[in-house]
């Protein structure tokens, strides 16, 4: 197995016995495939780290054909995230910004299904609290996420995305 996944079941990055081995994953993939022709943006929400992650994450990956577009849109989102509370977000490919990550849905949506825009928001915080964000940060996180969404969708639309009827 290449980098970014483990064959050890107790490991945090366990890949499973085979691709889409779990029923929840299969169900989501099957649903996505029934509507894929209508999807122009695949967006995941995760925590934590304050990142905007773009394809690709697997080892020795090329950049997507529209990487410069996705980078501009991610930059707009990062500016949106920081507008209200000065929360900094780092953006770029999964492999460049974070680590090698085999089997991400960001890669699957863009690489396999050719979904034009695909990214992952890794929300607050950047390490002090990890996955257990204090309650007093939940609403600010939601507010800045809405700011980021508005900024990124506006930027994408001005670049010619979301023109389907």
Image (spheres, rainbow, N blue to C red):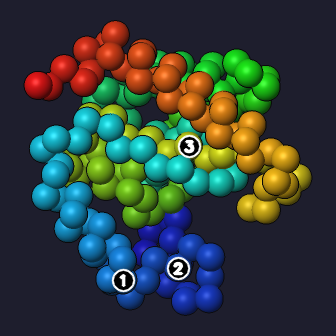
Check disc 3 and report the residue beneath it: 121
- Dot 1 corresponds to which residue? 22
- Crowdedness of circle 2 by 10 Å Cα count: few (<14), some, many (20+)? few
Mark 3 element type: strand
- Looking at the image, is mark 1 or mark 2 nearer the viewer? 1
The quadrant the N terminus occupies is bottom left
Choose between 95 and 50: the one closer to the eye.
50
Residue 160: image quadrant is top left
Residue 153 placement (x, y as % from top left): 41, 23
Residue 8, relative to residue 37: is it above or below? below
Residue positioned 57% across, 73% down in the render: 13
137 vs 62, left or right, is: right
x then y, percent, for residue 29: 26, 66
Indicate the quadrant containing the C terminus: top left, top right, bottom left or bottom right. top left
Residue 112 is left or right of residue 136, and the answer is left
Q: Is residue 97 visible?
A: no
| Residue visible at 50% across and 45% down in the picture | 120
For marks 1 and 3, give the CA distance. Answer: 23 Å
Q: Where on the picture, by quarter, is residue 89?
A: top right
Q: Residues within 10 Å of mark 3 (few under 14, many from 20)?
A: many
Q: Position of residue 152 (x, y in %)?
A: 47, 23
As drawn, which residue projects farthest toward the right? 128
Disc 3 or 2, which lies upstream in sequence? Answer: 2
CA distance separating discs 3 and 2 = 21 Å
Residue at image mark 2: 14
């Amino acid at each position: 197995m290449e980098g970014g996944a483990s064959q050890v079941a107790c490991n945090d990055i366990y890949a499973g016995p085979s691709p889409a081995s779990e029923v929840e994953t299969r169900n989501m993939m099957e649903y996505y495939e029934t509507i894929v022709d209508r999807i122009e943006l695949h967006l995941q929400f995760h925590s934590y780290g304050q990142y905007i992650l773009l394809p690709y994450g697997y080892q020795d990956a090329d950049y997507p054909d529209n990487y410069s577009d996705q980078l501009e849109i991610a930059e707009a989102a990062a500016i949106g995230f920081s507008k209200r509370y000065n929360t900094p977000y780092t953006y770029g490919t999964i492999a460049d910004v974070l680590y090698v990550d085999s089997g991400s849905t960001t890669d699957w949506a863009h690489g396999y299904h050719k979904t034009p825009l695909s990214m992952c928001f890794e929300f607050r915080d950047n390490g002090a609290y990890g996955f257990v964000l204090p309650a007093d940060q939940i609403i600010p996180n939601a507010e800045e996420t809405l700011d980021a969404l508005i900024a990124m969708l506006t930027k994408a639309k001005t670049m010619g995305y979301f023109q389907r009827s």
